[in-house]
Image (spheres, helix red, strand yellow):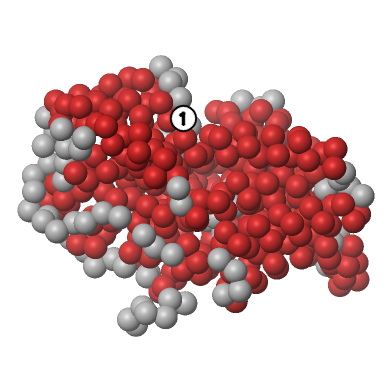
């Protein structure tokens, strides 16, 4: 989508660029919706700089979302909604609980595992936090966990929603950078699982130290078999999605469509949903989708304006003038991404920062796919860090617990996720091992 040829360009923060960006920060601070802020910045930059004709803005808005890959987003959101309404999500929780029953922190670990299951279906962290939180927070408290810690555990586990394929975030970054979403899904599988396991491990260690969970159901093969049999229909959905994508039978968009049909068919066959539920399901999913797509639409013209002003090239030149050490550059990129994730949602961060930072990653020899995995994982940390911390606000609204109180308990999970971000940044094989063209 973007062409970077000349990196010997200085980054000019004159009024034509700095003024609109500063005004955008002010609007954001006053609570103006992010899509409106991005649109305003785009208009002002195009007007003051003359980089692109302002008349092209309207066309760019529609062209930006006129992409086949984006159809997968509302479909995955709808699949997650149907999963909750049919009760299949509770079957997944039963399976997760049976599989982790032999661990002292069994239900806490099961909570993170079911977040991973949910991520394999919905591709959304907020949907996972809401769906899993309603099922588990009260039970976690009954098991002996402090309520803020229970909320923090759900919020951290739900971060896997954008890290484990199929992920909406990878669909968007693939669209922006011109990389196949299927390839990114393949590369993201191990990193996403690593994040899930590190959160589990962190919970186990904290549970051992603080003795939160006061129950241990013990390992039972019979219980696992029973849970798998009773939840067999729930398992069909992730198998259809991931099996279809990784086998090459479906594109991510086709897999999302098949998943919706499969989930609805199961719900109708079991009588857990009816035709009367369809308007509510479609309305609920449309509201979530209506938040994401306007942000994408208004972010793309802004990214194009920044590219026309040679901001990416200037950014590379500015950083390499300070240091050419790849280690420092990687740490700087991670710091920028985490800070951006703390104050802004993932979608605008991807659309704006990915084209700017990709040339810097290329400058130090980082493969494009590895950069994408590192970026999404780093942004994922922002879901459990104030002041934005979307997952923190979701579980806070469900539980009635203070966001700051939850955030204080989330610190160990933030540090755990940061360790995986660093690992992904410095060990390319973790995200590139399954990519056929990667030169080992």
**Image label count:** 1
* Residue 2 sits in quarter: bottom left
Q: Residue furthest top?
A: 30
Place of residue 36 in the rendered image (x, y in percent of width and height, measured from the top left): 41, 26
**Quadrant of the image for the N terminus?**
bottom left
Give the image location of residue 20, x and y in percent.
24, 26
> Along the horizontal axis of the image, is 366 left or right of 139?
left
Task: Please report the residue visible at 57 percent of the width from the left and 39 percent of the height from the top.
Answer: 289
Q: Which residue is mark 1?
A: 387
Q: Nearer the viewer, residue 348 or 228?
A: 348
Q: Quadrant of residue 256?
A: bottom right
Residue under the image location 61 percent in, 25 percent down: 402
Is residue 101 visible in this depiction of the protein? Answer: no
Image location of residue 300, percent across then percent down = 35, 42
* Frontmost residue, 317 versus 311: 311
Displayed quadrant of residue 229: bottom right
Residue 223, horizontal then vertical, whole percent:
89, 66
- The residue closer to the viewer here, 127 or 144, is 127
Which of the two residues, 374 or 172, is positioned nearer the viewer here?
A: 172
Disc 1: CA contacts within 10 A as few (<14), some (14-19) or many (>=20): some
């Amino acid at each position: 989508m973007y062409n970077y040829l000349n990196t010997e360009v200085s980054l000019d923060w004159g009024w034509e660029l700095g003024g609109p960006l500063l005004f955008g920060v002010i609007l954001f601070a006053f609570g103006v919706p992010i899509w409106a802020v991005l649109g305003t910045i785009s208009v002002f930059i195009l007007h003051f700089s003359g980089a692109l004709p302002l008349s092209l803005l309207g066309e760019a808005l529609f062209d930006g979302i006129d992409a086949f890959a984006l159809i997968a987003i509302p479909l995955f959101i709808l699949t997650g909604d149907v999963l909750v309404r049919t009760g299949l999500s509770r079957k997944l929780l039963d399976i997760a609980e049976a599989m982790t029953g032999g661990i002292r922190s069994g239900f806490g670990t099961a909570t993170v595992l079911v977040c991973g299951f949910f991520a394999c279906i919905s591709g959304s962290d907020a949907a996972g936090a809401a769906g899993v939180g309603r099922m588990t927070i009260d039970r976690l408290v009954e098991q002996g966990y402090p309520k803020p810690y229970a909320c923090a555990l759900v919020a951290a586990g739900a971060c896997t929603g954008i890290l484990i394929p199929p992920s909406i975030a990878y669909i968007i970054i693939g669209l922006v950078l011109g990389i196949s979403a299927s390839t990114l899904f393949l590369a993201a599988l191990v990193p996403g699982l690593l994040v899930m396991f590190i959160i589990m491990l962190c919970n186990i260690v904290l549970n051992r130290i603080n003795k939160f969970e006061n129950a241990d159901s013990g390992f039972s093969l019979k219980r696992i078999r029973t849970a798998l049999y009773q939840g067999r229909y729930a398992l069909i959905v992730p198998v259809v999605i991931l099996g279809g994508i990784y086998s090459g039978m479906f594109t991510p968009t086709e897999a999302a469509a098949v998943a919706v049909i499969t989930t609805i068919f199961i719900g109708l066959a079991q009588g857990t949903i009816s035709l009367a539920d369809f308007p509510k399901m479609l309305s609920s999913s449309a509201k979530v989708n209506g938040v994401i797509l306007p942000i994408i639409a208004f972010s793309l013209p802004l990214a194009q304006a920044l590219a026309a002003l040679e901001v990416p090239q200037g950014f590379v030149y500015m950083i390499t003038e300070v240091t050419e050490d790849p280690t420092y550059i990687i740490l700087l990129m991670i710091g920028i991404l985490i800070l951006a994730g703390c104050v802004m949602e993932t979608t605008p961060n991807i659309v704006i920062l990915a084209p700017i930072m990709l040339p810097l990653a290329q400058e130090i020899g980082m493969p494009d796919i590895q950069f994408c995995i590192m970026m999404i994982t780093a942004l994922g940390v922002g879901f459990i860090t104030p002041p934005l911390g979307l997952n923190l606000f979701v579980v806070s609204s469900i539980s009635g617990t203070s966001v700051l109180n939850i955030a204080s308990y989330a610190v160990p999970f933030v540090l755990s996720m940061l360790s995986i971000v660093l690992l992904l940044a410095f060990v390319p094989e973790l995200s590139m091992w399954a990519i056929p063209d990667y030169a080992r």
